[in-house]
């Protein structure tokens, strides 16, 4: 069994990755609360944005413009999907709405494979200016990108929680989460609120796509399905609590990476999001059953 | 509703335009991956055939190949380069006027699918020979089928059966012997520990057995690791490898280029690439894409086992033909070689070259029997791409390529660090093959133009 000192670098990488999972998870939760849609195409949108960024950088365009293009693409595609299919599927149950986003995922996945084929030996990479700088904490090297990954997760989670509590738009989103119909009859422009949620989620997908492309890999498949880790965090929070989503995401990132130095289980670390989500849902369901049983008696 | 539809159409069009304008599928991440032919500025591919400029129009000679193409592992470049070579031959006279029709089947490491692909090639496509197979498990699945039908495969081997059965002869060494070569080089640099990391796919035990034997014979500790691919936590993987190897150790990777790249780049970002004595990699890392993506920090830091002659600084007719065929046929179209100049496309070229050489020796009709007899009859052929002369032969096992190079990144290209070196007979499979087949002679260098 590795020593605590051996685990420390993995704690750092886990926190950084957990931070990015957190910002993705927060985006998923806010969108679900406002629209009732579990946005399974979150990863694919960010992945395609990152690939567009890579292509533009390869063409010699200024980096900051390329990053903005990623955000713009992710925001626009998500918004377009939301305002087109959101109203059409508004009255359908959440499973149908989630499945519909799978359609967008598959379309984007196909386009990415067509434009940036994953066949053959081509290797692509995005590097951010913060990759080459950093500092040491007790002989552990920490890059500024890793710091940004965690910091962005913290800021987005805290900022979103504050936004939902203290702003008019945030209050409207919370109201829609409770009851869309009543919110509409009270004169809240529900379509506009939904559009804002879609756009915000899309922008977060772009940020997550860029960070994950740098921290993990610039690969369409990898980035598309990394949404599963964020989704696991959101599910643990029952798609309700921003704070719990953040905490769950950090735990998933840390546990997943802390398993790496343990040779006996290292190859199973990819199961971490599934296992933790399954355990959490079982525990929470059991608590619900028990509390209902107590109410009945 | 109409307004929404129009808006959606505009947004979709703008998004696709942005993606289309931004995408440059043929461009690498940094500097150009292609090495222009050094013999001349014009592309000259007519040398691939016997009648330059004359398209072959006779009855096609059908050949087939099966390659793995799945997330994290894709060998389509090998089959595509073979296809490009055959297209070049067809554009320049064919085989005595007959064009080669090449069928490529891709698979995702599913035994049922692979067996079906083999039957498709034989029963539906009526292929006379199999060339260009590169698959994680195809040799294991189909070797008895090919033996039963009398097909002698020319392939790029991976699974043990590609090297241990009578009906398969590879142009490469495969992951085991190529990893042997990388470990051998590290041991020669007097490292005190080897960390050998590879993809977690079928066959890891077989692959690891070679490096294990070499390290044990040299009394050097070796640690075996595997990673699920595609790798989603490269930072952690790099840290683990470096920690396990130690400052006087070596990390040897056996991954396809995209996966090896994420690990090496993670090590660089974390500034830990110098925390080990050296990094090594098996042949898939031998590609200009990787050298260009890594940058100068890896010059003389990463040592790659090159199963085929390094292309970047080699100026011979065969190497220039390979580069010319890639330029003319491999940069776009249905058989695009996305990895560019490098080991994978070299393997495809060499397999096709051997097949064409064999086909040209056939005097009568082109049948399964005559084509496979010709493949098996290839003896002491100088491919211009390998250290040794290449022989198929009638042996119970085949490792015809068992001597190769070590290369290192040199400012965006791969340069030779160590010339032709035999893979050590400490690996029992190498010893067994040499007992039957002897040691092939070194291929004399083909004259430079």
Image (cartoon, coloured by chain):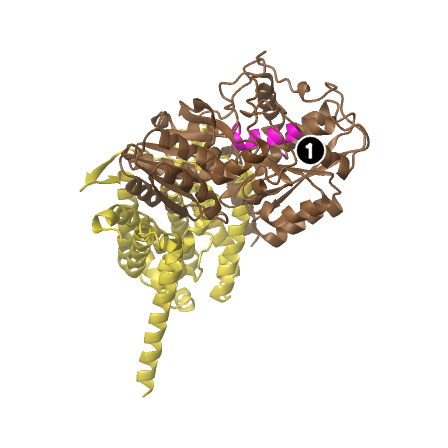
In the rendered structure, the answer to whether residue B80 lies left or right of residue B50 reads: left
Left-right relation of B386 to B300:
right
Magenta residues span: B335-354
Q: Is B217 contained in the magenta span?
A: no
- Between B224 and B3, the one lying in front of the other is B224
Q: Nearer the viewer, residue B36 or A197?
A: B36
Magenta: main secondary structure: helix
Q: Furthest residue to the front?
A: B435
Q: Which quadrant is home to the N terminus of chain B?
A: bottom right
Where residue A291 appears, as percent x and y from the top left, is 31, 79
- Identify the residue position indicated by label 1 in the image: B375
| Residue drawn where x is 65% and y is 51% of the image | B115
Q: Residues within 10 Å of mark 1 (few under 14, many from 20)?
A: many
Quarter of the image where one finds residue A33: bottom left
Q: To which chain does the residue with label 1 belong?
A: B
Say if the magenta span includes residue B346. yes
Q: Colour of chain B?
A: brown
Q: Which chain is yellow?
A: A
Split into 4 quadrants, where in the image is the C terminus of chain B? Answer: top right
Image vertical order of residue A53 relative to residue B311, above or below: below
Q: Is residue B107 visible?
A: no
Q: Secondary structure at mark 1?
A: helix
Residue A81 coordinates in the image, percent (x, y):
49, 52
Residue B110 visible from this viewpoint: yes
Expressed as whole percent of the image width and height from the top left, the position of residue B293 reads 42, 30
- Residue found at the far bottom of this picture: A297
The residue sitting at 61% across, 43% down in the picture is B165
Q: Position of residue A133 (x, y in %)?
A: 26, 34
In the figure, A171 relative to B339: above or below? Answer: below
Name the one closer to the observer, A180 or B421: B421
């Amino acid at each position: 069994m590795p020593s605590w000192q051996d685990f420390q670098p993995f704690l750092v990488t886990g926190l950084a990755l957990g931070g990015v999972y957190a910002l993705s998870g927060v985006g998923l939760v806010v969108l679900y609360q406002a629209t009732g849609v579990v946005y399974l195409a979150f990863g694919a949108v960010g992945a395609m944005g990152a690939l567009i960024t890579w292509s533009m950088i390869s063409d010699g365009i200024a980096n900051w413009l390329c990053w903005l293009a990623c955000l713009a693409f992710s925001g626009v595609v998500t918004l377009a999907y939301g305002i087109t299919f959101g109203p059409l599927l508004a009255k359908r149950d959440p499973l149908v709405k989630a499945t519909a986003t799978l359609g967008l995922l598959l379309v984007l996945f196909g386009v990415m494979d067509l434009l940036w084929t994953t066949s053959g030996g081509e290797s692509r990479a995005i590097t951010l200016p913060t990759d080459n700088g950093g500092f040491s904490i007790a002989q552990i090297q920490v890059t500024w990108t890793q710091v940004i990954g965690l910091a962005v997760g913290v800021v987005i989670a805290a900022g979103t929680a504050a936004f939902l509590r203290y702003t008019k738009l945030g209050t409207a989103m919370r109201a829609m989460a409770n009851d869309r119909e009543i919110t509409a009859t009270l004169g809240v422009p529900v379509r506009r609120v939904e559009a804002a949620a879609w756009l915000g989620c899309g922008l977060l997908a772009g940020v997550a796509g860029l960070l994950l492309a740098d921290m993990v890999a610039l690969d369409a498949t990898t980035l598309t399905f990394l949404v599963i880790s964020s989704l696991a965090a959101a599910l643990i929070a029952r798609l309700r609590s921003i704070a719990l989503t953040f905490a769950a995401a950090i735990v998933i990132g840390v546990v997943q990476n802390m398993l790496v130095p343990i040779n006996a289980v290292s190859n199973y670390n990819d199961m971490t999001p599934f296992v933790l989500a399954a355990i959490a849902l079982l525990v929470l369901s059991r608590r619900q059953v028990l509390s209902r049983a107590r109410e009945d008696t | 509703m109409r307004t929404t539809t129009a808006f959606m159409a505009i947004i979709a069009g703008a998004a696709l335009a942005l993606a289309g304008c931004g995408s440059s599928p043929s461009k690498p991440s940094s500097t150009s991956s292609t090495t222009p032919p050094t013999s001349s500025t014009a592309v000259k591919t007519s040398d691939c055939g016997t009648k330059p400029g004359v398209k072959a129009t006779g009855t096609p000679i059908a050949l087939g190949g099966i390659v793995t193409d799945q997330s994290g592992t894709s060998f389509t470049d090998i089959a595509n380069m073979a296809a490009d070579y055959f297209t070049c031959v067809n554009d320049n006279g064919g085989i005595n006027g007959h064009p080669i029709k090449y069928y490529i089947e891709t698979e995702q490491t599913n035994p049922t699918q692979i067996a079906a692909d083999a039957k498709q090639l034989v029963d539906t496509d009526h292929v006379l020979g199999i060339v260009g197979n590169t698959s994680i498990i195809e040799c294991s699945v189909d070797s008895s089928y090919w033996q039963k039908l009398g097909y002698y495969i020319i392939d790029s081997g991976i699974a043990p059966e590609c090297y241990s059965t009578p009906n398969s002869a590879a142009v490469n060494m495969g992951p085991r012997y190529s990893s042997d070569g990388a470990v051998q080089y590290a041991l020669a640099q007097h490292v005190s520990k080897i960390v050998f990391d590879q993809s977690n796919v079928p066959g890891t035990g077989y692959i690891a057995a070679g490096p294990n034997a070499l390290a044990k014979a040299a009394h050097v500790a070796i640690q075996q690791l595997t990673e699920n691919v595609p790798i989603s936590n490269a930072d952690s993987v790099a840290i683990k490898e470096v920690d396990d190897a130690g400052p006087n150790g070596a990390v040897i990777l056996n991954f396809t280029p995209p996966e090896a790249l994420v690990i090496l780049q993670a090590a660089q970002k974390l500034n830990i690439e110098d925390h080990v004595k050296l990094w090594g990699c098996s042949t898939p890392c031998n590609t200009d894409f990787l050298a260009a993506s890594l940058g100068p920090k890896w010059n003389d830091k990463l040592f790659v086992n090159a199963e085929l002659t390094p292309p970047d600084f080699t100026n011979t007719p065969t190497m220039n033909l390979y580069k010319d065929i890639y330029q003319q046929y491999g940069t776009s179209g249905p058989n695009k070689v996305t990895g560019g100049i490098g080991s994978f496309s070299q393997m495809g070229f060499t397999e096709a070259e051997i097949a064409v050489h064999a086909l040209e020796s056939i005097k009568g009709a082109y049948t399964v029997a005559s084509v496979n007899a010709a493949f098996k009859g290839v003896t002491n052929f100088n491919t211009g791409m390998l250290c040794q002369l290449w022989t198929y032969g009638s042996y119970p096992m085949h490792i015809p390529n068992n001597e190769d190079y070590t290369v290192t990144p040199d400012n965006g290209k791969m340069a030779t660090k160590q010339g032709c070196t035999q893979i050590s007979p400490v690996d029992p499979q190498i010893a067994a093959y040499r007992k039957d087949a002897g040691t092939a002679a070194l291929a004399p260098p083909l004259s430079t133009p």
